[in-house]
Structures are given as C-alpha cells and as structure tokens.
Amino acid sequence: MSKQSSTCQCLFQKKCEPLQIFTDVNNVFHERKPVILRGQDIGNVTETWSSVDYLAEKGGTKPVKIHVSPVPQMDFINKNFAYKAAEETHKEFFISEGEKYYLRALGDDVRKDIADIKVQFPELASDLIIPDLFPKDRFFSSVFRIASKGLQLWTHYDVMDNILIQISGRKRVVLFDPADAHNLYLNGDKSEVLDIDNPDPEKFPKFYAATRYEGELEPGDILFIPALWFHNVVSLDFGVAVNVFWKHLEDNMYDNKDIYGNKDLQPAARAMQIVDRAIKTLEELPPVYRDFYARRLVSKIESKCYNKTHVS
C-alpha cells in the first residue's frame, strides 16, 4: 500500500515530485527509487530516544566530536563549520549565539574503524530494531546522527544503498536522480548549490532543470536512499536518526579503505583518473581543436555509457 507525501512547496513546482509512502516493503527496492517506509517495527526508540536525558545516560561517557556551524546551511566544500569536542555541560557557545550542531558518529579509530552503533553505543543500540530490509551479510555501517533544529546538510550522494531511520523530530528530505548529475554543479560527491530552495539563477542556471523528489519524515519513518541518489536534509526539529548502509554490489567494486562508504566505486575511480589525463592531454591543443575533440569525447561517452531510459 502506498500514498504520496504532501505536495512540494518550492520554486521547482513543475519539476518536483512528492515521495511515495509505503507501508508494505515488498518490491519497493526494485525500482531503484527513493521511498518512505512507514509503520515498520524499529523497537521503542521513538519513545525512549525522545528524551535528551535518556540519550545522555545510555550514550555513556564516550567522547564525540560534533560539527558546529554558525549558519543553518552546512557547506562541506568550503568547510563553514568547526569540529568541537562535545561537553557534558556546555554553557557557552563555540562560535556564535545562533550556532547549529550536528553529530555524525564515527568509529573508535576514525582512520580505520567503520561506524557501528552496536559497537560505539551498545546501550542505545539495544533499543533499536533495524528492519530486515537487506541480507545481513551485506551490512556495512550504522551511523548515529543528531542535529539541531533548522540544520541543513549539503547535497551529496553515497555509493551504497542505505536507509535513514528517523527516530525523533521531523525532517524534510529532498532527493535528485543520478541522471541529473550534470545539473547539480558537482564538486566531487557534493553539489556546490547550498540553497536548493533559492539557487542563484545566474550562477546555477542548470539547477532549475533538475527534478527534485521531496517528502517529510516523521518519527518512526524510514527513507530508502538508493546508491547515487543525491540527497539534502533539513531538520525541522531537534532530531535523532540512524543511517544504515549496505553493499548491494560485489565487494571488489568498493574501495576497501573506505570507512565512510562515500568513495567512488573502483571502476568509476579509475575512469575518473583516465578522464583527468584526457583533459590534461587536450590542453595541449589550440582552443578550437580542444573544444572540438572535447565534444567528440563527450558524445562518445554519452552514446556508449548513458542509460537510454533517462531523458536529458
């Protein structure tokens, strides 16, 4: 059974699709599109984790670092935030009076260990039931997240399928199809467009051609984010969530040193390196010739590699 989330209220009204809401998970992953799952059994976390005192008690004394941003829109490209050690009692602001906080839990060794709520926060994890939505042997990580009201995370993609389990607070989610990558002004895996609701039409004109998929998560909802789908989230309230990632491709496709699950797949990374070398080689040509052969390369890649079911 499915229904649509509320109608998009945005400047992209003609290119905005409401996310589908499903209560039955059968076959929802096969279409490779984001959906909201509602009514799944995730334990009693929506009650217990709604208490900050409970989170502090069960979270233990484990030290964590948080992102502190003076503005609601966090920019991971230009790093408009600082990393600060969370304090048991925090009476003074770190940067400014209206600063926003964001916790993305890490592994014990941030350079080697993958985030897993069962390892880093076992007492909290005992409250949570992760729905059986993927083979257990394909599990990669489970990331504990806390965000201030109003905080907006940058638009980016991940290379693994994942679910975002919203436990407390509401969250607005906006997603973009991988086929719209050429409209999103990418810098690595991130979009340079911070204000997706009011993008600068002179600086980001192609962004208006992208179709956005929008919905609102309530406590207990689960958002399925297929690999490569760009996503941007705004915490409408103080919120707690858990992200669970899994490998839906063969292990050899992934970088075995990637502890965050956001490095490009091995063949894609090699292809990017080849493209970088091709660009450097084309720079040896005079401008007119460089333009001509660059267009030939783009045309060749488009004809050989683009998914023909996607219409630009």
Image (cartoon, rainbow, N blue to C red):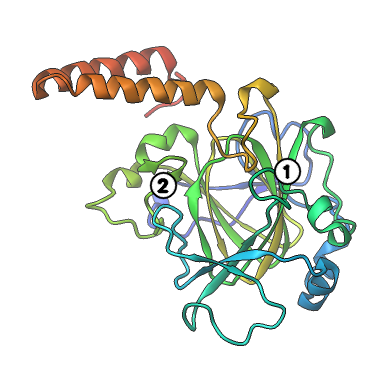
| Front position in the image: 283 or 147 | 283
Task: Judge left or right: residue 131 versus residue 185.
Answer: right
Q: Quadrant of residue 32?
A: top right
Position above or below: 52 against 75: below
- Residue topped by disc 1: 141
Position above or below: 152 against 256: below
Position above or below: 253 against 38: above
Q: Residue at x 43, y 43 (%)?
A: 211
* Callout 1 touching callout 2 (CB < 8 Å): no
Q: Quadrant of residue 51?
A: bottom right
Q: Secondary structure at mark 1?
A: strand
User: What kind of residue is marked 1?
Assistant: Ser
Q: Position of residue 290 (x, y in %)?
A: 16, 21
Observer-side mark, 1 or 2, equals: 1
Q: Residue at x 16, y 20 (%)?
A: 284
| Front position in the image: 15 or 273 | 273
Q: CA distance from mark 1 to mark 2?
A: 24 Å
Look at the image and tell me whether residue 116 can be seen. Answer: yes
User: What kind of residue is marked 2?
Assistant: Ser
Task: Judge left or right: residue 161 versus residue 67.
Answer: right
| Front position in the image: 30 or 279 | 279
Q: Which mark is residue 191?
A: 2
Q: Which mark is residue 232?
A: none
